[in-house]
Image (tube, helix red, strand yellow):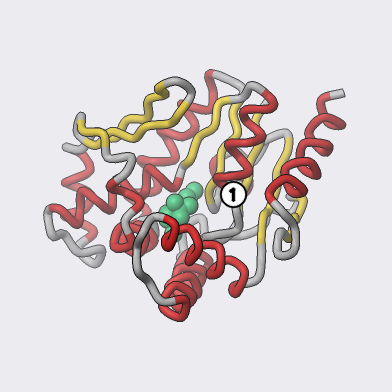
Amino acid sequence: MKIAIDGPAGAGKSTIAKKLAGELGFVYLDTGAMYRAVALKMLNLQIEPTDSKRVEETLEKTAIEIRYENGVQKVFLDGWDVSEKIREHAVSKAASDFSALSCVRIKMVELQRELAEKRNTILDGRDIGTFVLPNAEIKFFLTASVDERAKRRHAELSAKGMNCSFEEIKRDIEQRDYNDSHREFAPLKKADDAITVDTTSMSIEQVAAHMLAIVRKKEA
Ligand code: DC
């Protein structure tokens, strides 16, 4: 079984996907991490997203691997574990820019389909239900108001000791929403057959319980 969870940045996709995967004994695949790894490589080499030819050439010589260590997804870029590094603020923005390039998406989608094929998998991203796995048995579209998503991201960064203003985070989220949903190739979009879950005034536990009930019903 494949479960697709799509939605904008900060809607709670990865937290919920991890929880559901744990409950159901599924593998969780965080597809955003792959785009983040691509972005990190390009940032390291100072390649601009406007230089799609160089991006494409560089990707041919780039190894992005997903491994699971004690059930936790790790991302390796050219053999290095970059799982922490890709969470940095600059990488988030660059991931949104580089993920708009079709040469990047084609390569990542191929890898995602290959990984999902092997086992029961929950994938989170922007285009899982519409493009990566249009035949996924269950599709969710997770959303929340911009203010709520910015509030969550702000709390997350503050807890890590990172000093960021709420307004700046909110602006970044709005910009990423716009980028991700206006790109030409496989934009962020709710699949026609996806179930929308607005998490604005729900706790993580409530969202997880709600979605789990839907999955269990489908499984029965
Ligand atoms: O989910 P995330 O914030 O880690 O994703 C980082 C960026 O990667 C996001 O701004 C858009 C892009 N992305 C994408 O285009 N398609 C996906 N399936 C997942 C992420």
Closer-to-camera residue (47/131) = 47
Residue at mark 1: C-beta within 8 A of ligand 1: yes
Q: Is residue 75 visible?
A: yes
Closer-to-camera residue (57/43) = 43
Residue that badge 1 annotates: 13
Question: Is residue 27 rendered to the left or right of residue 53?
Answer: right
Question: Is residue 220 rendered to the left or right of residue 175?
Answer: right
* Residue 42 % position (x, y): 20, 54
The answer to whether 108 is drawn above or below residue 1 in the figure is below
Question: Is residue 141 rendered to the left or right of residue 31?
Answer: right
The answer to whether 159 is drawn above or below residue 13 in the figure is below
In which quadrant of the rendered view does residue 20 lie? Answer: top right
Q: Residue at x 37, y 25 (%)?
A: 67
Q: Is residue 188 visible?
A: no
Question: Which image quadrant: the C terminus?
Answer: top right
In which quadrant of the rendered view does residue 88 lie? Answer: bottom left
In which quadrant of the rendered view does residue 28 lie? Answer: top right
* Residue 145 % position (x, y): 65, 71
Q: Residue at x 55, y 69 (%)?
A: 151
* Residue 81 % position (x, y): 26, 34
The residue furthest left is 45
Q: Residue at x 46, y 80 (%)?
A: 167
Closer-to-camera residue (67/134) = 67
Secondary structure beneath dot 1 equals helix
Q: Residue at x 82, y 29 (%)?
A: 216
